[in-house]
Structures are given as C-alpha cells and as structure tokens.
Image (cartoon, rainbow, N blue to C red):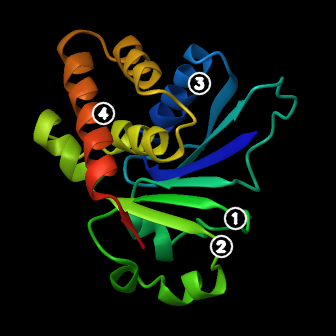
C-alpha cells in the first residue's frame, strides 16, 4: 500500500490533490481513499490531506501518520510544520520548489536520512504558465505519477478532466502534460 501525506496551505489545492490521486488510482483499477485534515483554517493556513492507494482493500480510516510518500506543495512549511514526521526510512519526498536542498536548509536532515529520496520540481511555475496562477496541486499529482509510475498518465488526465470541466480541465491537463515532460527530462534529485 502507498500511503501519501500532502502538505500545503489553504487555497493551494491540497484536498484536491488527494482527490485527484485517489480518482486516478481508481481509474487504474486500484483501491484508494482520500480525505483532508483541517479545522476552521483560512486561506494560507497549513493544511494536510491524505491518500492511500492499494491493490487490496483498505481497512484503515485514520490519518496517515507513517507515510511512505510526502507531497509538499509549499516549501515555506519546511520550518513551520514537522512535515517529515513519521516518514518511512525509505520514503519518497516530492517538493514544489525551484531551490536546492542547501537553499532550503535540509542538508543536515538529508544526511540523517540517507535512504529517503527527495525530488524537487517547480510545479507552481509550470502551472502558472497555463493557468496564470501558481497552483501546484495538479503538478504535484502528475510529478508523483511520473516519478513513481504508480499511476498512469492517462488516468491522471482523466481524473483532472473529471474534476475540472471545460476550459479549466483542458488547462489543467496541459499543466499535467507539462509536468510529465519536465520530470522525465529535467528532474533534479537532491
């Protein structure tokens, strides 16, 4: 089972990212669940959502406290929230950032967790090209699918167009395609 925890801020599409992951997994014939964890937060406050993807039934219904994948939509949370809490020793971290680990203050953390894979890519920048807004959620979902191959490109596009209809669906599908292309040709493992 893949257990994913998504960190971001209110208004960045953290909940939608989990829903897109679950929908794409379902489209690929897998079992999935997605749910948020937030109270009365307002735009800009830290928000977390969760997704589980499996080939078998999923019995757990509680928040993902020991993820094997983290999607971090906003790197400013790195030193405000313990985003790495409970991460598997062989975990995968996908971060929306144009900066390197040294610039993010993660060098020591990475030395202490040598088996964790950390990838960064500019999901917000790629989204802004198509949407005119730096919303990273679709890009992070597409980056996850591209790096892990746990979801197909077609299922991600289907989930996007199901969630966002009309022109917004097409624009978000373009974001997804751009991220798939970017990750396959430029991904920076840090």
Q: Report, in whole angstroms, how far the alpha carbon at label 1 lies from the one at label 4.
A: 26 Å
Between label 4 and label 2, give the one nearer the viewer.
2
Q: Residue at x 50, y 66 (%)?
A: 118
Residue where numbered disc 1 is placed: 90
Quick check: 147 above or below 102? above
| Quarter placement of the C terminus | bottom left
Mark 1 or mark 3, which is nearer the start of the sequence?
3
Q: Which mark is residue 25?
A: 3
For image coordinates 22% across by 41% down, the residue present is 127
Instruction: Determine the CA span between mark 3 and mark 2.
Output: 26 Å
Give percent across and percent down for residue 21. Answer: 53, 31
Determine the secondary structure under disc 2.
loop
Q: Position of residue 66 (x, y in %)?
A: 76, 56
- Cβ–Cβ below 8 Å for labels 2 and 1? yes
**What residue is pinned by disc 2?**
115
> Which secondary structure, mark 4?
helix
């Amino acid at each position: 089972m893949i257990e994913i925890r998504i960190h971001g801020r209110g208004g960045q599409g953290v909940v939608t990212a989990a829903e897109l992951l679950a929908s794409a997994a379902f489209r690929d014939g897998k079992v999935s669940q997605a749910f948020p964890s937030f109270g009365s937060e307002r735009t800009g406050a830290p928000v977390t959502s969760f997704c589980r993807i499996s080939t078998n039934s999923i019995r757990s219904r509680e928040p993902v406290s020991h993820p094997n994948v983290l999607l971090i939509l906003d790197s400013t949370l790195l030193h405000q929230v313990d985003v790495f809490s409970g991460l598997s020793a062989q975990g995968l971290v996908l971060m929306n950032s144009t900066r390197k680990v040294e610039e993010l203050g993660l060098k020591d953390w990475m030395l202490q967790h040598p088996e964790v894979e950390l990838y960064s890519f500019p999901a917000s920048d790629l989204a802004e090209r198509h949407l005119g807004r730096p919303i990273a959620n679709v890009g992070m979902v597409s980056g996850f699918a591209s790096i892990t191959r746990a979801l197909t490109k077609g299922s991600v596009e289907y989930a996007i167009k199901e969630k966002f209809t009309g022109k917004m669906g097409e624009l978000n599908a373009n974001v997804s395609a751009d991220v798939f292309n970017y990750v396959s040709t430029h991904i920076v493992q840090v």
